[in-house]
Image (cartoon, rainbow, N blue to C red):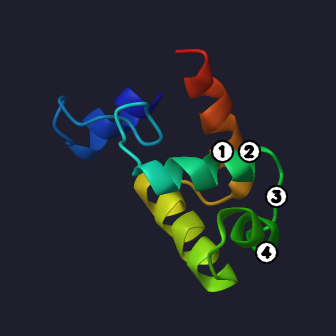
């Protein structure tokens, strides 16, 4: 489906689909994504990683943007999907 939409919109064929494993997260973003997948809140993530709650929120926002997602549940699903690889 993603490929059909990309084709219709004239996107180059070499472009990786949104949310694909081709997206590279930083080491810290991956840590945050793993914690999101465990169901932790930004406050809990901040405490676990010894960062501010705002920094945790910022990491989650960057992850959502990089992966083209709009919810934490999508991050969790992405983590689960990529854990099998």
For marks 1 and 4 on the same chain, the one whose residue lies earlier in the sequence:
1
Gap in angstroms between the C-alphas marked 2 and 4: 14 Å
The secondary element bearing badge 2 is classed as helix
The residue carrying pointer 4 sits among few (fewer than 14), some (14 to 19) or many (20 or more) residues within 10 Å by Cα, namely some
Comparing 85 with 11, the one in front is: 85
Q: How far across and how far down the image is residue 15, in percent?
A: 23, 36
The residue carrying pointer 3 sits among few (fewer than 14), some (14 to 19) or many (20 or more) residues within 10 Å by Cα, namely some
Circle 1 is placed at which residue position? 34
Residue at left 56%, top 54%? 69
Q: Identify the image quadrant of residue 14.
A: top left
For marks 2 and 4 on the same chain, the one whose residue lies earlier in the sequence:
2
Eye-nearest disc, 2 or 4: 4
The secondary element bearing badge 1 is classed as helix
The secondary element bearing badge 4 is classed as helix
Residue at left 41%, top 56%? 66
Asked if labels 4 and 2 touch by Cβ distance under 8 angstroms, the answer is no
Q: How far across and how far down the image is residue 53, in percent?
A: 69, 81
Q: Identify the image quadrant of residue 54.
A: bottom right
Residue 43: assigned label = 4
Q: Is residue 68 visible?
A: no
Gap in angstroms between the C-alphas marked 2 and 3: 7 Å
Asked if labels 2 and 1 touch by Cβ distance under 8 angstroms, the answer is yes
Residue 40: assigned label = 3
Gap in angstroms between the C-alphas marked 1 and 2: 5 Å
Residue at left 27%, top 34%? 7
Q: Is residue 81 visible?
A: yes
Residue 37: assigned label = 2
Relative to 19, is 31 on the left or the right?
right
Does 71 appear above or below 57? Answer: above
The residue carrying pointer 2 sits among few (fewer than 14), some (14 to 19) or many (20 or more) residues within 10 Å by Cα, namely some
Comparing 26 with 81, the one in front is: 26
Q: How far across and how far down the image is residue 80, in percent?
A: 67, 29
């Amino acid at each position: 489906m993603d490929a059909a939409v990309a084709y219709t919109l004239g996107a180059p064929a070499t472009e990786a689909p949104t949310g694909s494993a081709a997206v590279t997260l930083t080491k810290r973003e991956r840590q945050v994504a793993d914690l999101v997948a465990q169901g932790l809140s930004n406050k809990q993530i901040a405490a676990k990683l010894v960062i501010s709650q705002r920094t945790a929120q910022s990491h989650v926002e960057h992850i959502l943007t990089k992966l083209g997602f709009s919810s934490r549940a999508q991050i969790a699903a992405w983590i689960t999907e990529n854990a099998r690889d």
